[in-house]
Every structure is written in structure tokens, then in C-alpha cells.
Image (cartoon, rainbow, N blue to C red):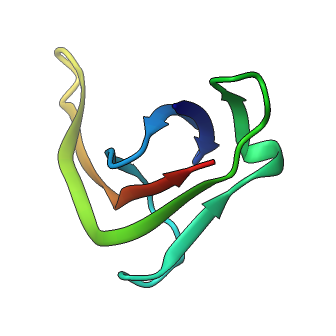
Amino acid sequence: MFAVIRTGGKQYKVSKDDKITVEKLDVEAGKTVNFDGDNVLFAAGGALAKVSATVVAHVRGDKVRIFKKKRRQGYRRTKGHQQDLTVLQITNVA
């Protein structure tokens, strides 16, 4: 059985024992997160499901470099971004 959940503005197709990386959730490592109601968009079998997940860890994503330049103007700017992420272990799709 699988379900489609929404978190962090994105949708994820999950089933039991999947490991997914989502945008940071304000939950301590080892705690349980429940997705139900509006956060579960679809579930196999037709009925809306309840999805439970355990927070495995909080990690940082890959660094993204942003470089802007205008030629012959002496204009160069470099910025960077590194997203905070949460790793979830799906424990139950009911």
C-alpha cells in the first residue's frame, strides 16, 4: 500500500519502510510525525490514509552557488545556500 503526502510544499509517494528526505520539520530526532487529513492527498485503496513516520536525523543539503556577472561592468556577486533537511523513516501507512 502507498500514499501521497504533502510537506514543505512538495508531494512524496511513500510506502511502509521508505526513507525520504524532506524540508526541515521542527521535531526532534527519534520522535514520530503523523500525516493525515489535508496532508495525505491519495492512498491506494481509495480511502484517505494516515501515515506515520519517525524522524531519523536532521541534515544539511548540498551547497548551491549563485554567481551573477555583467560583462565589462566590473559587477560580480557570489552567494550560496544550503538547505536544512529532515530524514524520515515511514513506519505505517494505514
From the viewer's side, name the closer residue of 81 and 17. 17
Residue drawn at x 36%, y 81% as measured from the top left: 29
Residue drawn at x 51%, y 67% as measured from the top left: 25
From the viewer's side, name the closer residue of 84 and 86. 86
From the viewer's side, name the closer residue of 27 and 9. 27
Residue drawn at x 17%, y 16% as measured from the top left: 72
37 lies above or below 42: below
Residue 21 in sight: yes
Residue drawn at x 58%, y 48% as measured from the top left: 8
Answer with left or right where residue 47 lies relative to residue 22.
right
Q: How many tags in the picture?
A: 0
Instruction: Residue lying at the far top in this picture: please name it.
Output: 71
85 lies above or below 67: below
Q: Position of residue 60 (x, y in %)?
A: 24, 61
Residue 9 in sight: no
Q: Position of residue 83 (x, y in %)?
A: 34, 54
Q: Position of residue 24 (x, y in %)?
A: 45, 63
Q: Position of residue 40 (x, y in %)?
A: 71, 40
85 lies above or below 8: below
